[in-house]
Amino acid sequence: MSLFTQETPQLGLGTTVGGYKVQYLEPVNLMVSATSTSQSVFIVPNLYVAGGTAVSPSYKLVEVNVVFGTAGGAAAAVTVEHLTGTQASGAGTALLSATIPLTGAANTVLSGVNSTTLTAPQATFAPGDRLGVVLSGTLTGLANCYIQVLLAIA
């Protein structure tokens, strides 16, 4: 009998398969338009069950990708932020080294560059922390804008 045939393997955090660590990824996807505002888009859960074991997860940013059908106006851009406690959208810690422009060629996937200057508490999301999306510039005209943020359970 081969592995995984009519079986459901239970993998816990930190499990390795063939020398590779199994990574649990959480995609956060949203659509924004010219009428969108900066907002919280994900709350880190207080409990997560992995391989039958309940854990309090922490998350780390893996990547941010954006694509739009119609570009925004002057200096339209987006970034993501780490929000804690009662911080309002736009008041958190920026997680990218620069904003991602929402201008230029349509239907082109743009990727953000993760900041390398964050300290451990800023770079890791604890239970109850939030992921926010911050929009800036003139969004007039922006349409069919899809943002994907990929988080890894640390």
Image: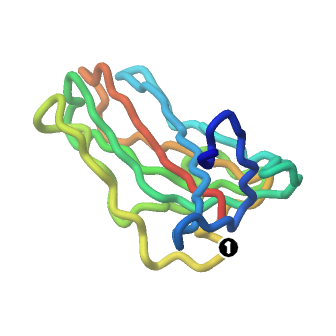
Crowd band around label 1 with a 10 angstrom C-alpha radius: few (<14), some (14–19), many (20+): few
Residue at position x 29%, y 51% from top? 111
**Three-letter code for the amino acid on which mark 1 is drawn:** Pro
Where residue 141 sits: x, y (%)?
A: 24, 21
Residue at position x 59%, y 54% from top? 91
In the rendered image, the vertical position of residue 6 relative to residue 130, given as above or below:
above
In the rendered image, the vertical position of residue 116 relative to residue 145, given as above or below:
below
Q: Could you tell whether 18 is left or right of 87 in the image?
A: left
In the rendered image, the vertical position of residue 107 relative to residue 132, given as above or below:
above
Q: Quadrant of the C terminus?
A: bottom right
Residue at position x 63%, y 78% from top? 120
Which colour scheme appears in the figure? Answer: rainbow
In front: 17, or 80? 17
Where residue 95 sits: x, y (%)?
A: 48, 61
Residue projecting furthest to the left:
105
Q: Quadrant of the N terminus?
A: top right
Residue receiving disc 1: 121
Where residue 73 sits: x, y (%)?
A: 21, 31
Where residue 118 sits: x, y (%)?
A: 53, 75
Residue projecting furthest to the front:
1
| The quarter of the displayed image where residue 102 is located | top left
In the rendered image, the vertical position of residue 55 relative to residue 67, given as above or below:
below
**Labels in figure, total:** 1
In front: 13, or 25? 13
Residue at position x 53%, y 68% from top? 18
* Mark 1: secondary structure: helix
